[in-house]
Image (cartoon, rainbow, N blue to C red):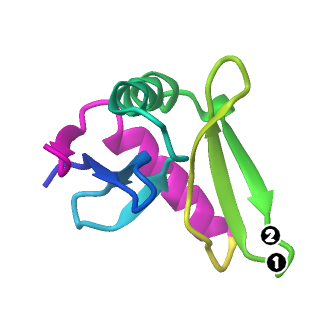
Amino acid sequence: MAGKFEVSQRANGDFQFNLKAGNGQVILSSQGYSGKDACLGGIESVRKNATSDANFERLDAKDGSKYFSLKAGNGQVIGSSQMYADAGGRDNGIRSVMENAPGAALDDTTA
């Protein structure tokens, strides 16, 4: 099963997306967007930028957990991962985003 982008609306009215792997696990989450068009633009930016490992920033949380952010060409963060116990898990998450994002279907739960 292929990955998918799931668009939803937060309680405050903002839109967000999650990129889910074929197994349904969330592998990348967006910021909140004030409008749906901006959210959909964020998805297109992920599709474009997820193909290059150089766009992924590997980070460490204060508690030692590992995570990553995906950045657009202008340096803006367009999505962040969950927390991982180790660097190997984080690297697997990055590979999953690289594999799933370009051809992921769109599931708009706000429609």
Query: Was residue 45 drawn as part of the magenta stretch in this picture?
Result: no
Q: Amino acid at mark 2?
A: Ala
- Residue range (magenta): 87-111
102 or 107, nearer to the observer: 107
111 or 51, nearer to the observer: 111
Q: Residue at x 80, y 69 (%)?
A: 61
Residue 39: horizontal and vertical position, in percent? 40, 34
Q: Which residue is mark 2?
A: 61
Quadrant of the frame with the N terminus: bottom left
In the rendered structure, find residue 24 and report the number of the disc placed on it. none
As drawn, 37 above or below 13 = above
Question: How many residues crowd around disc 1 within 10 Å: few (fewer than 14), some, or many (20 or more)?
Answer: few
How far is the residue under mark 1 from the one under mark 2?
Answer: 5 Å
As drawn, 70 above or below 63 = above
Question: How many residues crowd around disc 2 within 10 Å: few (fewer than 14), some, or many (20 or more)?
Answer: few
Q: Residue at x 24, y 39 (%)?
A: 104
Q: Secondary structure at mark 2?
A: loop
As drawn, 77 above or below 41 = below
Q: Residue at x 34, y 33 (%)?
A: 36
Query: Was residue 98 drawn as part of the magenta stretch in this picture?
Result: yes
Q: State which quadrant residue 90 falls in.
A: bottom right
Q: Amino acid at mark 1?
A: Gly
Label count reads 2
- Proximity of marks 1 and 2: CB atoms separated by less than 8 Å: yes
Compared across the picture, whether 17 is left or right of 7 comes to: right
Q: State which quadrant residue 106 falls in.
A: top left
Residue 67: horizontal and vertical position, in percent? 67, 62
As drawn, 45 above or below 84 = above
Quadrant of the frame with the C terminus: top left
Q: Secondary structure at mark 1?
A: loop
Q: Which residue is mark 1?
A: 64
Residue 95: horizontal and vertical position, in percent? 48, 49
